[in-house]
Image: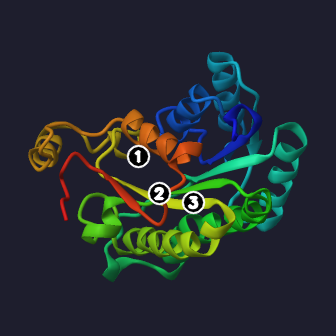
Amino acid sequence: MIRTSELTAIVTGAGSRRGIGRATAHTLAAAGWNVAVLDLDEAGAKETADEVATAHDVRTVGVACDVTDPVSVDAALAVLEAELPPVGALVNNAGITSPVPFLEVTDAEWEKVFAVNIRGAYAVTRRVAPGLAERGFGRIVFLSSVSAERGGGVFGGVAYSAAKAGQLGFARALARELGPQGVTVNAVAPGLIDTDITGGALEGERKEALLAGIPVGRNGRVADVADLITYLCRPESGYITGATYDVNGGSHIH
């Protein structure tokens, strides 16, 4: 029987105080997982880890990690493997957005967006997946976006939408490969979520216009996404793989 208390869930990009990553770290810990927080901001990573450990009485570690740098990823994984139980789940949450219109985008901007969202997810997943397959159990969740499905139009431009769509193909193909080893791979595509990234845009007429297109009548909360991610990471969710789950309040129905 798989026990989450004997496993570790990794959440990348979970240093932000109002982000989906930190909320997910809390929700996973409430479900019994030990949690490893990887973030470019070392202080943020450690703050999240300490907060989660105190609130849920699980083992945690917060580690500085640049997901775009394989050396940094290896160093971070070495730390958590030495301090925590074996990895059982990976949440590829680290990401950056970009609103730059395509006719104005630079090569550097394009490369930066793909470096974090695609190469970063690859670097951590490539390092973690062999152990999951070897142990015969694993849960991998990618944080994509409604922008990947509807073609931008909210905050993300073409670079962001293309990168997040790339994550969907990544997740689906990986689900086929790792399914026989007991590893599920799914994607979550949030819509308008109230985080530090979107907070500034959720004011006045702009907020009213955005909310008018959401059937449930409100913006999303980080807990809405974190709860779904935690559900997909459950040992009992082993027959769900290769799926994309929309969390958008009905703003994009397809």
Q: Of the residues tagged 2 and 1, which is closer to the observer? A: 2
- Picture layout, residue 172 above or below residue 222: below
What residue is pinned by disc 2?
Answer: 240
Quadrant (top left, top right, bottom left, bottom right) of the C terminus = bottom left
Name the quadrant containing residue 5.
top right
Against 134, is 247 above or below? above
Could you say which is closer to the camera, residue 178 or residue 163? Answer: 178
Horizontal side, residue 134 vs residue 44: left or right: right
- Is mark 2 in CB contact (under 8 Å) with mark 3? yes
Q: Is residue 178 above or below residue 7?
A: below
Inter-mark Cα distance, 2 to 1: 30 Å
Q: Between residues 157 and 150, which one lies in front from this camera angle?
A: 150
For the point 58% across and 72% down, the residue is: 174
Residue sitting farthest toward the right: 82
> Residue 53: x percent and y percent?
69, 23
Q: Is residue 68 visible?
A: no
> Can you tell which mark lies on residue 56?
none
| Amino acid type of the residue that numbered disc 1 sits on in the rendered structure | Ile
Which sits earlier in the primary sequence, circle 2 or circle 1?
A: 1
Front label number (1 vs 3): 3
Question: Marks 2/3: CA distance?
Answer: 7 Å
What residue is pinned by disc 3? 184
- Answer with the quarter of the image where residue 145 lies: bottom left
Question: Who's the residue at 11% across and 45% down the image?
Answer: 215
Residue 35 in the figure: left or right of residue 156: right
Q: Left or right: 226 with respect to 56?
A: left
Q: How many marks?
A: 3
The label shown at residue 197 is 1
Label 3 packing within 10 angstroms: few (<14), some (14-19), many (20+)? many
Does the CB distance between marks 1 and 3 fall below 8 Å? no
